[in-house]
Every structure is written in structure tokens, then in C-alpha cells.
């Protein structure tokens, strides 16, 4: 027995008083995790004298840690062997750990970046919030989404270490709190580099008011404690634009200020008050605008606490900060009401004003009279524009896929690009192949490694060597057998979670992502109905049996998105309950889609639905995960789909719909009502929203969806995401995929070529680009 196993036994004995055979899954999970933590303690130190990059992000959607950490430490097989010897396996940990500190793409990207940086020896640390409650848990009741709180700490947190000695204070207008860091090791593959994810927890300065307690005023005695803890209590759903604005600003300032103070403390320990080397030792990447208040806060800290003048402080800030934009949706470009800002962090506001003046001066120096041009105001119409602040004060602004960056430059941020073109750059997103292939699909990983070796685990471009196997009949057959195996595994999981049977011989067509109008789950719903009607009418006779799978959470306050969930669930009920559809078609909406579900769904997919309106999805990352696992993309020319098709070939994917340019030229004359009137297929499916085909339980949700397409509202035009414009070309493409699937060998070839050409979409490539081109680390 080696040290790791001994340690597990010792922890079980000392902490729980049990033997390995007598331990339950949670005790084993805790002991295995702690033993792994113990094994890395010596290697978990920041090397001195190297520039470090800091990733400031309101979300880190890490996924389950136990398997990935064990794999990266090279302990996964050993742990599994040990557990099996005691009648268990690492699979038993599935029900133990939760994975909910993010909404979706943005938080998951942050997690992939941490993994890639640690794997490639890039000194990158994450800084964020240790929420008590992660994104809500979703379940369905009569087809309606319901939410309940997700207490992700209920199984403990063996992967974090509380660092009391590094706590700092954060001051608001109405309270001062202690920010206490919990550090998580971020273990690179092979265990050579261990970076840190530092998550801040908000706590009161003192546990409770003793005087009030003695006077038996218990509620008041703990009121301050509760108010402090509230700040890191819950992760906000990102589509909920109005939810808790005040608390959200507090959260952003809380982790921004704490993280900067922590970095400054480190730096001061080495250099004292000489800040001349600060920007040579730290780079800070702002993940979207959420941490952008860091900019005036760094100015405040440098000027107020360390006596620098504005020019010195600004010059440091500009060299340190870089900003990533993740969306062009106007509603997601954060703006803070000046009144609110002043009531929460009044001490920071003067630095916003200084930045505003600095901007005016900088524009003046370039011969631009900013005062005449609204987009150049940081404070405009009583609101502080955080994206503008980031672009002005940071040295780099990047988009997350080529088309997205082009849209930023040409449309969304064109005034800024005109003044500072050199600051704009593209960093197409990526995903870590270690989680999204090696861990979630060991069968396909084995297939690949047998043929081309295991170099792809750290250099995904190696997958190119797989391309010749797409023409090898035996390899294709093996690939198909693996795909079937993954479908069987998913079917077992879905059966256990949803109580629904899936047939592994069906085509698996999957759309999983946050529920949002621009992602067009409603268009998918319409196309399914169109196929259903065609099957019922006998117009469609050669349809390959298909299951349409969905997974998506709607922000609790996003009424229309919730209407779409209910509508899809009604369609599922109709289709699955129709005896004519047996063996032909099925619709399943899984509950509580999260990283763990994604790890089951994605490897089982034949078709990856990526159908956002061209120009709306900044990049997408699930598209890359599906591609890597050998699915074809059924998608629009949007986000990273464009680069996926470029890499894997248009002939191996199924592209449809209007391009960004076509949408722009159709916009002024677009008339969804006329389309509906003149096209009986469209009319038939759209009318199901209001003709009594489906019931929304008397809520009016379906009528509201119908109206959003036909008449719009004061704040948007009818069918603003062009569902009906793309309807026919989407349905045609869906049937093209379906027909192509009949030739299983030819389809397997397409799938294999997708995997073989996925090299570009490794977050290893992306993070190296950030390191080299933005951070200089
Ligand atoms: O860059 C990661 C991810 C992109 O892949 C998605 O296309 C994009 O929608 C998402 N953006 C956000 C923005 N959230 N806010 N605020 O999540 O980022």
C-alpha cells in the first residue's frame, strides 16, 4: 500500500472513525479528496519573481473537481482501484459533488482557462466569489420550470483551504465586511504546475453584537452578520437584468477590491512602496464587465493609500488591465445608475469622474472633441458605462470569436475602435480536452490514443493525425460502436434522473445551453412540430427515428424563456404520447442541465444544434465540445460555428440560415406576419401557440410568445431574432442531416473528421494566445 492509500485509510479512521469497508460514499469522497490535497501541499507554492496573470471573474463553473483533480495528479486509476477493492468506485462520487458556481459559457470558459494554464505552466490565478448558493436547481412541475436553492457546500468543500491570514476588509457606504479567501489548487495535467483559484467569502467584522445578545435582542445581535454574509450568498442568473442590482454591485466591488488588496499586499511584501515594477509583475484580465469596478478601485488604492498621482496610477492600471467582451447584447453591457453607485461605494465614484476627465483629455490629444459624442462618455444620462470604462482604461479589449470581434470593431464598439484600433484583438474561445474528452469520454479517448498516441491530451492539434482513419472502415465501425455505447450510458442516466427511456438506435439530436430567445430553442420547437405534422400527414416517409434532447435553465425572472420551456414540454408530451410516433420520434427536456449532465449528453450526440441568429452568439463553447466528441454541427454562421466549419469542412456539417449581412439587409422590410400568412407550414406551427393545440395552464405565456413574433413590443420589433426568416432553411437542413444519417459509414466519416479537426478549439491554444499577446507571461 502506498502513501496515498495509507492516507485515505488514516483520514477515514481519524475523521470518521470508520474503516474503508464501512465508510459511506461521502466519507470516502472527503478522505480521497483530502488525501489528494495532502499529496500536493509541497508543490502548491507561487514561484518567486515571475509575472503572474490574474483572472478576475464573477463566475468559475468548475464542474466536479474530484475526478479531474485525481486525473491531473495521476491518481485517478489508483483511487478507483482502491475504491473497487472496497466495493466502491469513483463513479459513486457523482451524487456527492455539485458544480454550480456559474451560469453557463462565461464561467465554464474561466474554468477551462485555469485548467489549460496550469497544464502549460502559465502562472494564472483565478479570483472570484465563494457563493454559498450557486445557480438554482431546476425541476419541472407540469412542464413549468421551478427553481430551488442550490447549496453547493452541503457535501463540504475538501478542495478549498481557508486563508484566515489573508483576509482583508472591504468598505461600503453602509457596512464594512471581512473578505476571507478560500484557495483551491488548480492542478495542471501531470501535476507539475499548481495555480490557485481564490474565492472570497463575505463575513462580518465580528460574529455578533455581544451587548445586544446579552439584552436578549437576538435578531438585532446577528443582523450585521447576516447583512455581511448576504454579499457572497447567491450567484445571480445572468439573464435576469433587473434582479438585485444593488447587491450585484456590492458583489462586484467586494471581490474586485478584495482581489486587488490581496495582490497589492503580496507586491508590497516584496517591493515596499515602490510601484515601478507592479505592472511587470501582474496582469489582470477582466472577464466581462463584472469586475470592471476594479479599475477605479485600483486608482483609489494607489492614490489614497499609497500616495500616487492620477497619471502614475492610471499608467499602472492601463498596463495591468485587459478586458474581454463576451456579448453584444445591449442589455448585458452593464451600466450602473450613478445614484445607486454613490449609495453603495461613494468613495470610488470620484475615481470614475477622474477617468471621465482623463478620457476627455486623451480624446482631445487625438483631436477628438469627446463632449460632442455620446459614446465617448463614461458617465452618460446618469449611468456609468462599464464596457466603455474598460475599453478606455485597459490596454486590450478582445472578443471571443473572429466574427464577434469583427462585430465589436465594425458595429457595437466602432467609435472606440476608430480611436484605439491597436487595443482590439480576437481570442477565439476554447475548451479543455482533458475534461471534455479524456474525462467525459474515455471510450473515444482510448480509440484515439490507440491510433495516434496520447499527445492530444496536451497538444490537441495532434488530432489531425486521426483524419486518415475517417476513411478506414474498421475505425468507422469502432467509432459507431463507441457512439452507441455513449448513448446507452446516457439512456441509463436519463432513465434514472427523468424516468424516461431512450432508444440508443435513434439519431440523437441535442440542444443544450442557457434558455434565451437569441439561442432560438423556439425555432427548434417549431421545426420539431413541422416534422411531427409531416409524419402525421404522411408527407414525410423516410424519416430516420430521432430523439430531440434539450437541456436549459431560464433565469427565474425571464418570463418568455420560461414560456419556451413550457411549450417544449407540451410538445414533448404530445409527441411522446402519440402512438403513431412510437419508434419514430421522441422529445425529451432534461431537468437541471449542468456540467455533469453535459458530460453525459455531449459524447452521445450525433447532431449538435447551434442555431442562434447570426450575429448574436459571441462564440459558444458547447459547439466545440460536441465537435470534439464527434458530432456534426447543425448551425448558423454565427460565433465560433464559422471557425468550426472552416476547420472541419462545410461538407461535414450542416449550415443554414441568413448570414449577418443578409439579416442586416432584410431588417428594414422584415415582416414575420406576412411570412406567417403566406406560408402554410409556418402558419401551422406558429398557430399552435394560440389555437388551443397546447395548454399553457391559463398563464397566457404562449399568447405572449405569439405576440413577440407577430407584433413585438415597445422595446423590440416583431420576431427580433428572425426565427421565421430562417424557418424553412432550418427545416430543410434538419432533414438533410436526417437523410445523411441513413448512410451510417458516411456519417461516421463526417463525425470523425470533426474530431480530427477540433485542435484549434483547445483552451490550451486560447490561453497561450492570452499569455503571449496580452499578458506577456
Ligand atoms: O465567451 C464565453 C461565452 C460565449 O461562448 C457565449 O457565446 C456568450 O454568450 C457568453 N457570454 C455571456 C455574457 N454574460 N454576461 N454578462 O455569458 O460567453
Image (cartoon, grey):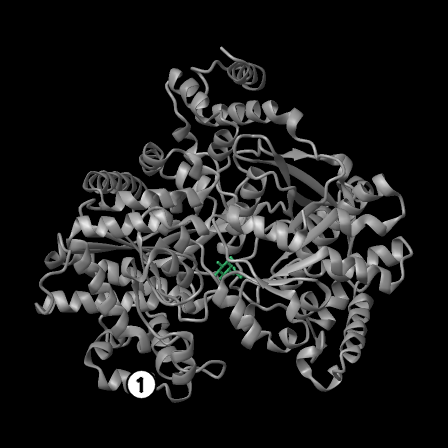
Question: Which of the two residues, 723 or 743, is positioned nearer the viewer here?
Answer: 743
The residue at which mark 1 appears reads as 673
Q: Is residue 657 above or below residue 583?
A: below
**Residue 758 placed where, x, y %?**
40, 50
Question: Which of the two residues, 90 or 299, is positioned nearer the viewer here?
Answer: 299
- Judged left or right of residue 413, residue 732 is left
Q: Is residue 672 above or below residue 91?
A: below
**Residue 437 placed where, x, y %?**
40, 41
The answer to whether the beta carbon of the residue marked 1 is less than 8 Å from any atom of ligand 1 is no
As helix, strand or loop, the secondary structure at mark 1 comes to: helix
Q: Is residue 106 visible?
A: yes
Q: Which residue does the image show at 66% across and 66% down from the upper left?
A: 423
Residue sitting at the far top:
1
**Residue 19 placed where, x, y %?**
48, 13
Q: Residues within 10 Å of mark 1 (few under 14, many from 20)?
A: some
Q: Which residue does the image show at 80% across and 62% down from the upper left?
A: 314
Amino acid at each position: 500500500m502506498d502513501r496515498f492509500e495509507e492516507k485515505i485509510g488514516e483520514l477515514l479512521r481519524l475523521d470518521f472513525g470508520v474503516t474503508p469497508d464501512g465508510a459511506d460514499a461521502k466519507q470516502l469522497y472527503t478522505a480521497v479528496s483530502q488525501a489528494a490535497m495532502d499529496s500536493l501541499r509541497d508543490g502548491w507554492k507561487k514561484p518567486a519573481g515571475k509575472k503572474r496573470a490574474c483572472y478576475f471573474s464573477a463566475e468559475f463553473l468548475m464542474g466536479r473537481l474530484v475526478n479531474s483533480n485525481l486525473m491531473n495528479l495521476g491518481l485517478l486509476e489508483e483511487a478507483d482501484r482502491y475504491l473497487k477493492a472496497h466495493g466502491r468506485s469513483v463513479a459513486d462520487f457523482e451524487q456527492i459533488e455539485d458544480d454550480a458556481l456559474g451560469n453557463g459559457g462565461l464561467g465554464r470558459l474561466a474554468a477551462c482557462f485555469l485548467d489549460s494554464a496550469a497544464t502549460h505552466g502559465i502562472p494564472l490565478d483565478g479570483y472570484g466569489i465563494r457563493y454559498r448558493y450557486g445557480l438554482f436547481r431546476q425541476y419541472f412541475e407540469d412542464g413549468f420550470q421551478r427553481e430551488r436553492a442550490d447549496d453547493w457546500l452541503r457535501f463540504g468543500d475538501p478542495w478549498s483551504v481557508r486563508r484566515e491570514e489573508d483576509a482583508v476588509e472591504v468598505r461600503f457606504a453602509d457596512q464594512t465586511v471581512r473578505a476571507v479567501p478560500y484557495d483551491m489548487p488548480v492542478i495542471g495535467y501531470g501535476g507539475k504546475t499548481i495555480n490557485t483559484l481564490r474565492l472570497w467569502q463575505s463575513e462580518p467584522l465580528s460574529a455578533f453584537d455581544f451587548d445586544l445578545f446579552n439584552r436578549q435582542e437576538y435578531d438585532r445581535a446577528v443582523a450585521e452578520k447576516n447583512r455581511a454574509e448576504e454579499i457572497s450568498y447567491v450567484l445571480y442568473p445572468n439573464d435576469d437584468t433587473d434582479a438585485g442590482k444593488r447587491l450585484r454591485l456590492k458583489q462586484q466591488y467586494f471581490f474586485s477590491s478584495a482581489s486587488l488588496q490581496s495582490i497589492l499586499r503580496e507586491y508590497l511584501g516584496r517591493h515596499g512602496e515602490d510601484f515601478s515594477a507592479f505592472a511587470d509583475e501582474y496582469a489582470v484580465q477582466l472577464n466581462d464587465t463584472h469586475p470592471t469596478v476594479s479599475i477605479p478601485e485600483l486608482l483609489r488604492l494607489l492614490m489614497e493609500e499609497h500616495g500616487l498621482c492620477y497619471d502614475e496610477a492610471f499608467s499602472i492600471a492601463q498596463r495591468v488591465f485587459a478586458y474581454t467582451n463576451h456579448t453584444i447584447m445591449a442589455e448585458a453591457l452593464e451600466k450602473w445608475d450613478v445614484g445607486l453607485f454613490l449609495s453603495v461605494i461613494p468613495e470610488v465614484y470620484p475615481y470614475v469622474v477622474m477617468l471621465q476627465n482623463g478620457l476627455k483629455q486623451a480624446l482631445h490629444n487625438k483631436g477628438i472633441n469627446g463632449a460632442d459624442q455620446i459614446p465617448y462618455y463614461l458617465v452618460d444620462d446618469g449611468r456609468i458605462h462599464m464596457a466603455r470604462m474598460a475599453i478606455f482604461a485597459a490596454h486590450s479589449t478582445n472578443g471571443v470569436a473572429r466574427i464577434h470581434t469583427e462585430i465589436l470593431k465594425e458595429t457595437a464598439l466602432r467609435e472606440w475602435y476608430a480611436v484605439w484600433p491597436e487595443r482590439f484583438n480576437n481570442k477565439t474561445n476554447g475548451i479543455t480536452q482533458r475534461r471534455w474528452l479524456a474525462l467525459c469520454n474515455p471510450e473515444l479517448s482510448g480509440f484515439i490514443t490507440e491510433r495516434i498516441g496520447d499527445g492530444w491530451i496536451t497538444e490537441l492539434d495532434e488530432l489531425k493525425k486521426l483524419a486518415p482513419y475517417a476513411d478506414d472502415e474498421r475505425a468507422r465501425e469502432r467509432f459507431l460502436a463507441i457512439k452507441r455505447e455513449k448513448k446507452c450510458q446516457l439512456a441509463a442516466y436519463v432513465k434514472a434522473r427523468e424516468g424516461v427511456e431512450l432508444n440508443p438506435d435513434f439519431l440523437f439530436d441535442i440542444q443544450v445551453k442557457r434558455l434565451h430567445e437569441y439561442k432560438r430553442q423556439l425555432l427548434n420547437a417549431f421545426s420539431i412540430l413541422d416534422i411531427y405534422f409531416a409524419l402525421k400527414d404522411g408527407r414525410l416517409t423516410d424519416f430516420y427515428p430521432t430523439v430531440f434532447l434539450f437541456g436549459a435553465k431560464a433565469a427565474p425572472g425571464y418570463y418568455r424563456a420560461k414560456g419556451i420551456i413550457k411549450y417544449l414540454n407540451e410538445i414533448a408530451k404530445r409527441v411522446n404520447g402519440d402512438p403513431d410516433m412510437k419508434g419514430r420520434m421522441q422529445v425529451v427536456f432534461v431537468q437541471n442541465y449542468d456540467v455533469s449532465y453535459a458530460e453525459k449528453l455531449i459524447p452521445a450526440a450525433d447532431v449538435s444544434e447551434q442555431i442562434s441568429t447570426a450575429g448574436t452568439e459571441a462564440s459558444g463553447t458547447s459547439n466545440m465540445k460536441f465537435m470534439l466528441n464527434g458530432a456534426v454541427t447543425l448551425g448558423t454562421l454565427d460565433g465560433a460555428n464559422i471557425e468550426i466549419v472552416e476547420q472541419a469542412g462545410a461538407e461535414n456539417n450542416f449550415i443554414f440560415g441568413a448570414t449577418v449581412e443578409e439579416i442586416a439587409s432584410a431588417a428594414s422590410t422584415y415582416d414575420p406576419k406576412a411570412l406567417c400568412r403566406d406560408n402554410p407550414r409556418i402558419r401551422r406551427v406558429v398557430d399552435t401557440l394560440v389555437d388551443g393545440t397546447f395548454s399553457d395552464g391559463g398563464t397566457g405565456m404562449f399568447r405572449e410568445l405569439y405576440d413577440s413574433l407577430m407584433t413585438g413590443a415597445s422595446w423590440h420589433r416583431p420576431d427580433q431574432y428572425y426565427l421565421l426568416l430562417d424557418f424553412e432553411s432550418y427545416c430543410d437542413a434538419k432533414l438533410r442531416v436526417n437523410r445523411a444519417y441513413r448512410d451510417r459509414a458516411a456519417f461516421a466519416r463526417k463525425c470523425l473528421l470533426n474530431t480530427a479537426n477540433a485542435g484549434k478549439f483547445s483552451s490550451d491554444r486560447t490561453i497561450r494566445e492570452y499569455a503571449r499577446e496580452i499578458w506577456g507571461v
